[in-house]
Image: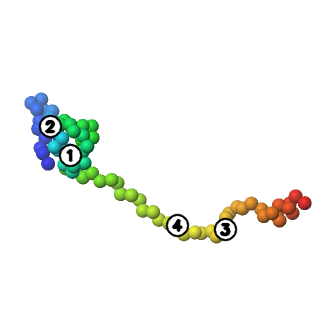
Amino acid sequence: MKAQQTSRSGRRVAPKVSCEDCFFRVNLLCALDVQEPCATFRPSEAELRPPQQLRLVFRQERRTRAAWAFPSAQEQAALHA
């Protein structure tokens, strides 16, 4: 890791970055043909990994029958008879 420099006023001076230091350029993932760092610049030392996905866990079926169902044809006929 590179040490940061300080100016005479005591402020930290940001190190100069270049396309050659970019994670995407180092790993041959850059599709741009520019010499200066772009908006997607990421330091090559950074470990860029997607977040771990949650596991898909299937729940066991608890019910074998729906909690509510339409009345059967016979039940409807009996109600309206």
Q: Which residue, as the protein is rendered here, is positioned at the far top?
A: 9
Label whose residue precedes the other's in the sequence (4 or 2): 2
Left or right of 54: which side holds 37? left
Snapshot quadrant of residue 66: bottom right
Distance from Cα at disc 3 to Cα at disc 4: 16 Å
Observer-nearest of 32 and 49: 32
Position of the C terminus, as image quadrant, is bottom right
Q: Amino acid at mark 1?
A: Arg
Q: Nearer the viewer, mark 1 or mark 2?
A: 1
Query: What count of labels does the image hold?
Result: 4
Snapshot quadrant of residue 37: top left
77, above or below 7, in the image = below
SS for dot 2: loop
The residue beneath circle 1 is 25
Q: Amino acid at mark 4?
A: Arg
Observer-nearest of 67 and 74: 74
Q: Amino acid at mark 3?
A: Arg
What residue appears at the point 27 percent right and 40 percent down from the top-left corner? 40
Label whose residue precedes the other's in the sequence (1 or 4): 1
The residue beneath circle 3 is 65
* Mark 3 burial class by Cα count in 10 Å: few <14, some 14-19, many 20+: few
Residue 28: % across, % down: 21, 49
Tag shown at residue 59: 4
